[in-house]
Amino acid sequence: MNTPNLHTAICEHFKLSKIPFLKRTKQPFSSESFKENLSFLLTVFYSRQVAAVTGPPGSGKSSLIFYALNELDPAEFRVISCELSRPKKGALYKTLATKMGLNPAFRSDDIKLQIINFFNEENAQGKFNCVIIDEAHSLSIDMIDELRSFYDEGNNFSLILSGLPSLINRKLNLTLTIPMKQRISLFLECSGFSLNELKEYIKHQMEDVQPKNPLFDEKCFPFLHSETSGIARKINQTCYGALLECFKQEKTIITEELIKKVLDKISPT
């Protein structure tokens, strides 16, 4: 059975409109911390500043930024992101320029100037610019200082650094990187859900796929929370695996036993 047919069979078995836990829902799950982070993050796009978004892997950093961008009018904002891990100066500027539709110059400093000039032109037309650096915890000390220089020299865009907590705890606490840290006006932290939030998150997922009958045994939630630490990506991975396992066993309710079986496969030994 190929994947599309398998997903169709799963949907029919559980009476779902589509498969949950694989993609972001159209509307975000709005926990209190998410709503607060979103409201603060949106200010970055309306006034020139540097923001840091940090959290453990899978805690929702990318989703927070994704849903923030959905709030913006593309005619008024240009947001360019770089997802390179451990980027070098030339690769970073070339990636940004290419995503902006520019033909990058040969030298990295010339590309930087191209970007700054382009932002100036767009600013003159009333468009606000923002640069997002993902995996920012992997930046070298020299690259962090290079970004500070880029931000200062341009003086015409906002900058969002997104990464693991080590970005703040280690990289930005060094003597050479303090100048960048001093420019960060907004520190946002993404964390795991509480037990109640986890229940509401799964309820949110279920509302998106409209099951005819309950899909989860309530007794499995405390165990799921303790094993995933409330981290959204771990919850999605585990619940999707449990859905498949439940289907394979021709059952209709996901139980703690099924979740344990899935976690035995995906958890490190």
Image (cartoon, rainbow, N blue to C red):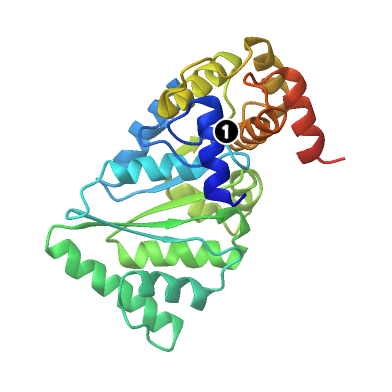
**Above or below: residue 67 compared with residue 92:** above
For this orientation, the residue located farthest to the right is 269
Q: Nearer the viewer, residue 181 or 9?
A: 9
**Helix, strand, or loop for circle 1?**
helix
Residue under the point 67% across and 36% down: 241
x then y, percent, for residue 202 = 53, 23
- The quarter holding residue 243 reads top right
Residue drawn 47% across the image and 28% down it? 16
Q: Determine the residue located farthest toward the top in the rendered image.
A: 219
Residue 46 in the image, given as x and y percentages of width and height: 24, 45
Identify residue for label 1. Answer: 232
| Residue 7, position as x, y percentages in the image | 54, 41
Instruction: Pick whichever, 186 or 82, lies toward us.
Output: 82
Foreground of the two, 81 or 195? 195
Q: In which quarter of the image is the C terminus?
A: top right
Name the residue type under label 1.
Answer: Ala
Farthest residue to the left: give it. 125
Where is residue 136, by image quadrant? bottom right
Residue 244 visible = yes
Residue in the image at 57% along x and 24% along y? 193
